[in-house]
Image: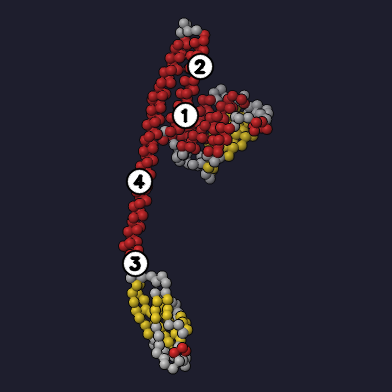
Amino acid sequence: MEFHYTALSFQAPEKNRFKYKLEGVDLDWMDAGGRREAYYNNIGPGHYRFHVRACNNDGFWNDTGASVAFVMLPHYWQTWWFKISLVTGVGLLFTYIYRIRIGRAREMERLRLRIAADLHDEVGSNLGSISLLSRMLQEQSSATDEAKKDLSLINRISGETANAIKDIVWFINPEYDTMQDLLLRMEDVANTLLSGIECDFQSRIENPQRKLSLDFRQNIFLIFKEALANILKHSRATKVWIHVSEKNGVWTLSLKDNGVGFDATLLSQGNGLKNFRRRTSAIKGSMEIKTQPGQGTELLFSTQSV
């Protein structure tokens, strides 16, 4: 906004001085000197009054001065109805996005349930039939030794595949997404794989019913299962301690055995830890292995639980 003003003085107009103030904007009078214009930027909507005073060449001020009142009308984006409409529109947009996300999440859960059911019913059933038929053929006296070896291999492979399918069904089934389900599955697998070895399984979790991401469940479970398989194959242990804990959002897994242990300097020379490192990196975790020959082995794994 630009205001122009002047004062009549015919003797020495160049000596006239001015002060001005815009009510609602200026807190005090502004000394304009001899300038006969006032400028304002970004004046909001509302009622205002502009005042101006002048003094003559002798320095006498006119305290009455002059004034002009005016109203600044708001732009459409400054009106109350526009602000309400904007807030309402943003709220509706977020509601729409939220509903889409919820709908997609539910659709994904239905898909996971359907895939899990199909794998269990179709693939699992077929593998069970293959295993059963191979055992029946092995028991037939007419089968040659070579055929029995092949049938034994078929039976073993079908059994291993059936177990792998069982794990996959558990991964993708949304009914097993909680921390409690993960712990129950880990304990069940530990008791199954370490049959004949004393196993002490303990857990201390802040929120057992909290849902976990598929990546977290899958990588944690496979790290755990592979660690158990290594204990079973190489440690010659008689007892295994398993401890799972969660504190302040940090999830920790400890597996310790009383087996033969091994030389820790040989870890970097083999390929046995590649899967551990890959899965640990996938969920931004950290892993440490403590071992010495004749003193057992301990695997420590920690990550942010998600």
Distance Cα–Cα, label 2 vs label 4: 51 Å
**Helix, strand or loop at disc 3?**
loop
Task: Quickly name the residue at label 3.
Answer: 75
**Helix, strand or loop at disc 4?**
helix
Three-letter code, disc 4: Arg
Task: Quickly name the residue at label 1.
Answer: 167
Task: Quickly name the residue at label 2.
Answer: 153
Three-letter code, disc 2: Leu
Is the C-beta separation of discs 3 and 1 under 8 Å? no
Q: Residue at x 53, y 30 (%)?
A: 225
* Mark identifier at residue 99: 4
Q: Earlier in the sequence, mark 1 or mark 4?
A: 4
Q: Nearer the viewer, mark 2 or mark 1?
A: 2
Is the C-beta separation of discs 2 and 4 under 8 Å? no
- Local packing at callout 2 (Cα closer than 10 Å; few below 14, some 14-19, many 20+) is few
Distance Cα–Cα, label 2 vs label 1: 21 Å
